[in-house]
Image (spheres, coloured by chain):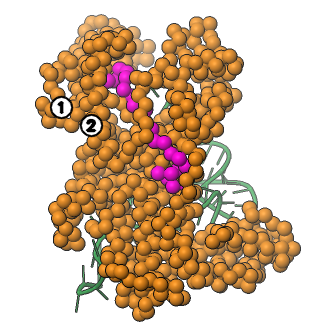
RNA sequence: GGCUGCGUAGCUCAACUGGAUAGAGCACUUGACUACGAAUCAAGAGGUUUCAGGUUCGAAUCCUGACGCGGUCACCA
């Protein structure tokens, strides 16, 4: 297949316009789309925009163009015109040959690997508490985008930067030191990252107690009476919390002191820090493994937080940044509709953004990638606009290939997740729940009853994880989504298991078919509607992957897999495969099942979803 | 308040980037298993695409305004 069908049709239309009307039109004048299901045909030319050029009615153009295409292109077997829409019916023999020659390949749709490298960052958690539902969306999105880019031919490197330092981990450390009594994950039988998280929570609780007690003191009353806005008590104390932590709080002072000790390299503090982070990593490792994700390289903030200063210097020399009298460095981004942005403190120390400048360069040095994707929630949109603008002004070689894969936060039916209110949905618990759900559901079925306990557990795990992952990935990244863990995750309808089920059916019929000679497939001539729909859908797969990769949007792939599965189920219902009335039909339909199964597996693999052979 | 994103069936989401009668799933009603697997299929009901204007052959999509809901506006990360 040297030329893709849409391109061929487009150039056919252009030739037709030239021959029929003497018009010299361009590709962009031709609107080609897939035909809506309620009409005959697979491709549709919209003729409204041509009326101005041809100076004829849309219906007339449609009819004349349709006739022309039918005459000149062997792929076009028929056409019909409805108002300004010319629907083209593609010849059965074209579809049949496409299926047998092209779609049958295992790597169908997957682009050949190039050496163009792209770094995809995702997850990047703090080490003070376990991963939750928000991380899950991030991880699934990042992973599937990485897979998608791989399928599009890029050489992808998956990385995360672990926020292993700072005040948060010090809080956990301090709480463990003071209240832990030497307990360990082993001694309490707790998953290690959860163990550390419990101390983080405990710190917050103790701090709140301390804060509330302090609010009763005369010193506190004096401060509140000076509130210029005269807010009520609750509101005032809420807004004062941070200041309290930094000025009056004993626990706050102790945590900050610990941070300073850590920065000084105090051996005891560093040892404690290593111990607790070690526990967290052990726990994260298990969660990642269960989610089926991995990384090519891990960056640690403790090793990168001082980077970027030299780039600030370079920016100063270049005149891209300026130094204030107090020694702080700023960038004036007002001409890019961004603000004055601080990039170095007056005492010369780094800021968050300084570090990000440094790690961008570090990654470029490590991988030579001219494209970098940052999977980070949309609350940081502004930060990344600034970061990318700064890198552009520094004339970094990768500055044009930066992409913030921004996604909406995950809400619960009750609203936003709040750790303070204990409404955070834990990642491990969530996986347990969906797998439990899949288990309950499997009890009602017998399809796997002859398998071993071990095999059945494996299937249930795949089904549960598919439900969870599909549910999250199918929503477009930019969209804020509501996730209801109480209803857990559906296993029916527009879901991962629905797609798996379609795949399982294609496998089942192949098992039943055994070693059958399929050479008769080529003699098949007349497609059933369900077959034509399936094949034309398969035909769209390579283009779809390319488009999805271009948009960094895995949800497109999820929706595609669902649609394909739906067509397969419909096909399954409408026609017989092994009981078909000719050997050609049997062989052809088996080939079709194989191709559909391959694409389903391929597409779901991009989403990080495993396909069972039975379920 | 400035900037920014979003608002589609009761609920969760689509809509090929300006095209046809706005589509799926869940939930609800009804039908189909001695069939290659019913985690399936088929049918029904469900909409003034938040509202008001504008642009044009044509708007959920683009422009203006209003309303509602987020996010963000640190020498924090």
Q: In the rendered view of the protein, which quadrant contains the N terminus of chain A? A: bottom right
Q: Secondary structure at mark 2?
A: helix
Nearer to us in this view, B4 or A563:
A563
- Residues indicated by labels 2 and 1 sit on the same polypeptide chain: yes
Q: Does residue A46 appear anywhere in the picture? A: no
Query: Looking at the picture, does residue A361 appear above or below residue B11?
Result: above
Q: Secondary structure at mark 1?
A: helix
Query: Looking at the picture, does residue A494 appear above or below residue B30?
Result: above
Residue A154 among those drawn in magenta: yes
Q: Position of residue A161 (x, y in %)?
A: 43, 32
Q: Position of residue A565 (x, y in %)?
A: 42, 69
Chain under numbered label 1: A
Q: Are marks 2 and 1 in contact (CB under 8 Å)?
A: yes
Give the residue drawn at x 22%, y 62%.
A455
Q: Position of residue A310 (x, y in %)?
A: 58, 18
Give the residue drawn at x 41%, y 41%.
A295
Q: Which chain: green? A: B
Query: Looking at the picture, does residue A528 appear above or below residue A396?
Result: below
Q: What residue did someone put label 2 on?
A: A283
Q: Which label is found at residue A185?
A: 1
Give the residue drawn at x 52%, y 85%.
A522
* First-in-chain label (2 vs 1): 1
- Magenta stretch, residue numbers: A147-169
Dividing the picture into quarters, in which one does residue A41 lie? bottom right
Dividing the picture into quarters, in which one does residue A416 lie? top left
């Amino acid at each position: 297949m040297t030329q893709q069908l849409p391109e061929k049709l487009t150039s056919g239309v252009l030739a037709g316009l030239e021959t029929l009307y003497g018009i010299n039109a361009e590709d962009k004048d031709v609107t080609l789309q897939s035909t809506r299901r309620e009409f005959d045909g697979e491709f549709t030319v919209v003729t409204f925009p041509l009326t101005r050029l041809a100076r004829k009615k849309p219906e007339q153009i449609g009819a004349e163009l349709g006739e022309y295409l039918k005459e000149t292109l062997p792929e076009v077997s028929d056409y019909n015109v409805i108002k300004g829409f010319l629907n083209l019916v593609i010849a059965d023999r074209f579809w049949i040959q496409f299926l047998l020659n092209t779609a049958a390949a295992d790597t169908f749709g997957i682009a050949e690997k190039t050496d163009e490298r792209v770094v995809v960052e995702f997850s990047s958690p703090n080490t003070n508490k376990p991963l939750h539902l928000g991380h899950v969306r991030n991880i699934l999105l990042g992973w599937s985008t990485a897979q998608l880019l791989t399928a599009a031919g890029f050489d992808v490197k998956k990385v995360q930067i672990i926020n292993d330092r700072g005040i948060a981990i010090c809080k956990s450390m301090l709480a463990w030191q003071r209240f832990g009594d030497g307990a360990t994950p082993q001694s309490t039988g707790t998953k290690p990252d959860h163990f550390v998280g419990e101390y983080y929570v405990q710190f917050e609780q103790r701090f709140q107690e301390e804060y509330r007690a302090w609010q009763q003191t005369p010193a506190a009353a004096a401060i509140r009476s000076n509130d210029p806005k005269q807010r009520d008590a609750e509101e005032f104390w809420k807004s004062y919390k941070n200041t309290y932590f930094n000025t009056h709080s004993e626990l706050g002072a102790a945590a900050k002191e610990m941070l300073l000790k850590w920065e000084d390299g105090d051996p005891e503090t560093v040892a404690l820090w290593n111990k607790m982070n070690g526990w967290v990593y052990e726990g994260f490792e298990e969660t990642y493994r269960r989610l089926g994700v991995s990384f090519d390289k891990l960056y640690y903030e403790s090793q990168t937080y001082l980077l970027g200063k030299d780039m600030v210097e370079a920016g100063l020399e270049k005149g891209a940044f300026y130094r204030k009298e107090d020694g702080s460095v700023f960038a004036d981004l007002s001409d890019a509709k961004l603000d004055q942005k601080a990039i170095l403190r007056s005492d010369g120390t780094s800021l968050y953004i300084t570090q990000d400048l440094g790690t961008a360069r570090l990654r470029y040095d490590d991988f030579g990638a001219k494209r970098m994707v940052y999977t980070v929630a949309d609350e940081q949109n502004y930060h990344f606009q600034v970061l990318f603008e700064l890198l552009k002004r520094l004339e970094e070689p990768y500055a044009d290939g930066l992409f913030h894969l921004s996604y909406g936060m995950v809400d619960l039916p009750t609203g936003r997740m709040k750790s303070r209110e204990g409404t955070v949905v834990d990642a491990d618990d969530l996986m347990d729940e969906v797998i439990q759900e899949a288990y309950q559901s499997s009890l009602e079925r017998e399809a796997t009853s002859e398998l071993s306990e071990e095999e059945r557990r494996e299937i249930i795990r795949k089904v549960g994880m598919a439900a969870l992952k599909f549910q999250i990935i199918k929503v477009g990244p930019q969209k804020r989504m509501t996730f209801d863990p109480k209803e857990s995750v559906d296993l029916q309808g527009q879901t991962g298991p629905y797609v798996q089920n379609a795949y399982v059916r294609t496998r089942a019929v192949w098992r039943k078919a055994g070693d059958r000679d399929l050479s008769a497939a080529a003699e098949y001539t007349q497609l059933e509607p369900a077959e034509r729909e399936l094949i034309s859908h398969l035909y769209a797969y390579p283009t779809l992957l390319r488009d999805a990769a271009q948009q960094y949007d895995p949800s497109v792939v999820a929706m595609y897999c669902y649609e394909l599965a739906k067509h397969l189920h419909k096909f399954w219902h409408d026609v017989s495969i092994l009981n078909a009335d000719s050997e050609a039909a049997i062989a052809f339909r088996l080939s079709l099942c194989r191709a559909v199964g391959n694409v389903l597996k391929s597409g779901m693999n991009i989403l990080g979803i495993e396909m069972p052979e039975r379920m």
